Image (tube, rainbow, N blue to C red):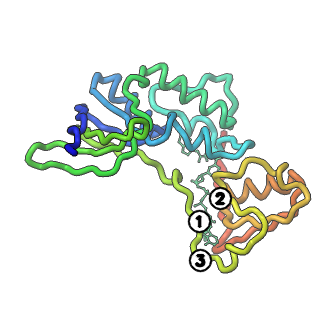
Amino acid sequence: MEQSPATTFFTTVLIIGAGPSGLAVAACLTTKHIPVLILDRDDSTAPLWRYRTYDRLHLHLPKQYCQLPLLPYPPSSPTFLPCADFIRYLDDYVATFGLKKHLKLRRRVDSAKFDSAAARWRVSAANLESGKVEEYEARFLVVATGENDEPVLPVGITGLDRFKGDAVHSQQYRTGKAYDGLDVLVVGSGNSGMEIACDLAEGGARCAIVVRSQVRRPILLSV
Ligand SMILES: NC(=O)C1=CN([C@@H]2O[C@H](COP(=O)(O)OP(=O)(O)OC[C@H]3O[C@@H](n4cnc5c(N)ncnc54)[C@H](OP(=O)(O)O)[C@@H]3O)[C@@H](O)[C@H]2O)C=CC1
Ligand SMILES: O=C(O)C(=O)Cc1c[nH]c2ccccc12
């Protein structure tokens, strides 16, 4: 059977990733009237912040280090924003710069090639709603897919397959209250591991933490 040709979309700048970075790039370009399209495989902007964070999450950095270009936080907002406030800010950001019309969600980018003869990027994406392949042609490509979207699990932990308890990645962890009275081992002493260990202890778990190399010292910022 003959395949119908893929639909092609044209733009000047194609941005992959609708997290804070992708949205910031899009806002800066659209205010200069440069055409953009933003692709994301998830069904919303900032999916990591919406779907894969624990309940008590606040930004660890003071708000002045976490604001996106062209839209300051109101002075009344707290110095360390709760996650829900940060998401609201990102939603306001999308509304303020009219980014919704440039967003193409549920698009999984599968390849990106630079066609030097045409001086264009040719990007192929699966439309996860329709199941069809879409092609995108752009003069510039911005990859804003973040560092933390995909969970990283250590491979080859002997006996993990026989472990009777829950083993979850920090992306699935929500609250220490769910572990009241249980023994929990936290692997990793970055910001996630440290804060989750604290949340577990406050939730009533007996908690231990694995530190592979070192406990990093906090950098003190004046706020
Ligand atoms: N509220 C906020 O704003 C928050 C921000 N963040 C940010 O998100 C990013 C990711 O943070 P995080 O999720 O903590 O990840 P990180 O990469 O910062 O930390 C991962 C930790 O896991 C350890 N680790 C990895 N593999 C193994 C293994 N096989 N055995 C033992 N230990 C292992 C690492 O040890 P080693 O040091 O030896 O590599 C490290 O301590 C950071 O930029 C962080 O600042 C995170 C949480 C909250
Ligand atoms: O507050 C922290 O520690 C974070 O890791 C969040 C964060 C890092 N870089 C950012 C850029 C914009 C908004 C939030 C963050």
Judging depth in this view, the residue of 210 and 32 nearest the camera is 210
- Give coordinates of residue 154: x percent, y percent: 59, 70
**Residue at image mark 1:** 153
Q: Residues within 10 Å of mark 1 (few under 14, many from 20)?
A: few
CB of mark 1 within 8 Å of CB of mark 2? yes
Tell me the number on the disc at residue 156: 3
Label 1, label 2: how far apart the Cα atoms are: 7 Å
Can residue 75 be seen from the camera position used here? yes
Question: Furthest residue to the front?
Answer: 1
Label 3, label 2: how far apart the Cα atoms are: 15 Å
Image quadrant of ligand 1? bottom right
Residue at left offset 41%, top offset 45%? 144
Label 3, label 1: how far apart the Cα atoms are: 9 Å
Judging depth in this view, the residue of 20 and 47 nearest the camera is 47
Q: Residues within 10 Å of mark 3 (few under 14, many from 20)?
A: few
Up the image or down, 3 lies above or below 203; here it is above
Which amino acid lies under the numbered mark 2 shown in the image of this protein?
A: His
What secondary structure is marked by label 3?
loop
**Residue at image mark 2:** 169
Q: Is residue 207 left or right of residue 103?
A: right
The quarter in which the C terminus is drawn is: top right
Judging depth in this view, the residue of 24 and 169 nearest the camera is 169
Residue at left offset 43%, top offset 34%? 105
- Give coordinates of residue 48: x percent, y percent: 56, 44
